[in-house]
Image (cartoon, grey):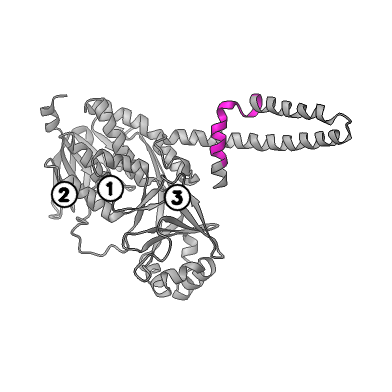
């Protein structure tokens, strides 16, 4: 496609969050004219207090997308490597569980700072313009028209060639697409909510080991903590709403933590614990699935607008970043032809993004350090379950055969002759029935997974 035609293409990116600002960078490199519309004010100059800073886990998938726009080194330099999980038992005992090899780790990054860096990077392109305090009112992709409401409270019609919906789990763009025929949509709130707490620095240093994702598993609820650059930790308490609703007073909160997280109280401090607990109410968590992610060549959904997920797999942001990367790779493949790129993007990403929604429930950590497609990981998970079940059957059979053989062997005058036979049977059973040779590498991985 001729570059002069590309320059005339106008793209409206709805949402200036993490995915929207990253996608603006990708599209700006292709010489499209980009207008980013964000309902909130510019977080880089905001004067209001947003509460505490949320931390996110940046994995290999997210880093690949940042690398493609030249931002990986900058973002990584502001993150803290977490090379293992640190499990805190009720008794106070701590156990480290590595993610993988010594070279494998995930990064703890500040969501707020990451968003600021992405906005600044996008604005450096001369063909990108940011519009803060602009809320989307109407969206008519077929006619290439959106209506936005700015701070002047006067609705404004804007024409564009492509609408990119990056406006989160409660996407206004998606709500307009839901009115179109054959658009599938589902959402589910889980019974749990989450609340952010803070572990402050201690004597100018981290109060706990910094290069870990700290986890306090407690049956139906848990708490995690991620390190910050300022030597603090951002904690997230996940718990059913009915349990949050029982904690009405300061004493209720302290007693609850004394019972379930006693080692966290001296780390947080009773005063700060109570202050943080009642600063903001527990927030809900929603899972969203939809199909398709596009409408002809006029509109496409990315990130949470297409696939909001619960955070237990820690891949929400990374999956959104990978949306941007895959979209960019397809734009390369189809020479910026939106009519070809968008349908293929939907076909590729829908199975993967639906799968990550399921994987977030499994906390299937094995795909964190690769770009294995998410739906393939689910297929492997189902296969592994079958293998494990067959393995348990095989183990039981082996014990029964061995027990019978030992009894015969004990009473036999020719033990060494018969000694070879059961192992020949077992080898034949192994190779032909349960575990073909090509499956052995995966069995080792499964064994590692189970041990974790």
Q: Secondary structure at mark 3?
A: helix
Distance from disc 2 to disc 1, alpha carbons, whole Å, reads 15 Å
Q: Nearer the viewer, mark 2 or mark 1?
A: 1
In the picture, measured across the screen, residue 73 lies left or right of residue 92, that is left
| Foreground pick, 106 / 353 | 106
Residue 93 occupies quadrant: bottom right
In the picture, measured across the screen, residue 393 lies left or right of residue 50, that is right
Q: Which residues are magenta?
A: 432-447
> x, y percentage for residue 374?
43, 36
Distance from disc 3 to disc 1, alpha carbons, whole Å, reads 19 Å
Answer yes or no: is residue 150 visible: yes
Pick whichever of labels 2 and 1 is earlier in the sequence.
1
Q: Main secondary structure of the magenta part?
A: helix
Answer yes or no: is residue 296 visible: no
Q: Secondary structure at mark 1?
A: helix
Above or below 227: residue 68: above
In the picture, measured across the screen, residue 378 lies left or right of residue 204, that is right
> x, y percentage for residue 229?
32, 59
Name the residue that disc number 2 marks: 131
> x, y percentage for residue 17?
26, 49
């Amino acid at each position: 496609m001729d570059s002069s035609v590309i320059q005339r293409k106008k793209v409206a990116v709805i949402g200036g969050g993490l995915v929207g600002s990253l996608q603006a960078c990708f599209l700006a490199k292709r010489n499209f004219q980009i207008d980013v519309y964000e309902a909130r004010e510019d977080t880089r100059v905001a004067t209001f207090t947003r509460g505490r800073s949320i931390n996110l886990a940046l994995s290999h998938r997210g880093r690949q997308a940042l690398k493609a726009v030249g931002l990986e080194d900058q973002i990584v330099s502001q993150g803290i490597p977490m090379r293992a999980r640190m499990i805190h038992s009720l008794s106070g005992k701590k156990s480290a569980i590595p993610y993988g090899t010594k070279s494998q780790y995930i990064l703890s990054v500040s969501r707020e700072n990451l968003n600021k860096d992405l906005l600044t990077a996008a604005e450096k392109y001369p063909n990108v313009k940011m519009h803060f305090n602009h809320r989307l009112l109407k969206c008519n992709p077929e006619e290439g028209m959106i209506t936005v409401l700015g701070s002047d409270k006067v609705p404004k019609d804007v024409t564009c060639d492509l609408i990119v919906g990056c406006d989160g789990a409660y996407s206004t763009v998606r709500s307009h697409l839901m009115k179109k025929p054959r658009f599938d949509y589902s959402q589910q709130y889980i019974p749990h909510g989450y609340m952010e707490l803070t572990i402050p620095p201690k004597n100018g240093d981290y109060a706990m080991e910094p290069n870990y994702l700290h986890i306090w598993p407690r049956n139906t609820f848990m708490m995690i903590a991620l390190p910050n650059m300022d030597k603090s930790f951002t904690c997230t308490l996940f718990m059913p709403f009915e349990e949050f609703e029982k904690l009405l007073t300061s004493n209720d909160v302290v007693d609850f933590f004394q019972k379930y997280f006693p080692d966290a109280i001296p780390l947080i401090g009773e005063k700060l614990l109570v202050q943080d607990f009642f600063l903001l109410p527990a927030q809900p968590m929603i899972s969203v699935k939809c199909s398709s992610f596009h409408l002809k060549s006029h509109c496409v959904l990315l990130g949470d607008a297409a696939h909001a997920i619960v955070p237990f797999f820690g891949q929400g942001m990374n999956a959104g970043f990978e949306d941007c990367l895959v979209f960019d790779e397809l734009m390369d493949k189809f020479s910026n032809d939106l009519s070809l790129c968008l349908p293929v993007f939907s076909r590729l990403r829908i199975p993967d993004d639906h799968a990550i929604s399921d994987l977030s429930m499994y906390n299937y950590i094995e795909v964190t350090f690769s770009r294995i497609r998410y739906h393939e990981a689910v297929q492997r998970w189902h296969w592994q379950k079958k293998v494990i079940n067959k393995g348990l059957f095989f183990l039981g059979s082996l014990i029964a055969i061995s027990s019978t053989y030992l009894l015969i062997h004990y009473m036999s005058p020719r033990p060494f002759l018969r000694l070879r036979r059961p192992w020949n049977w077992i080898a034949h059973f192994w190779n032909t029935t349960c575990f073909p040779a090509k499956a052995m590498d995966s069995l080792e991985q499964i064994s590692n997974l189970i041990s974790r």
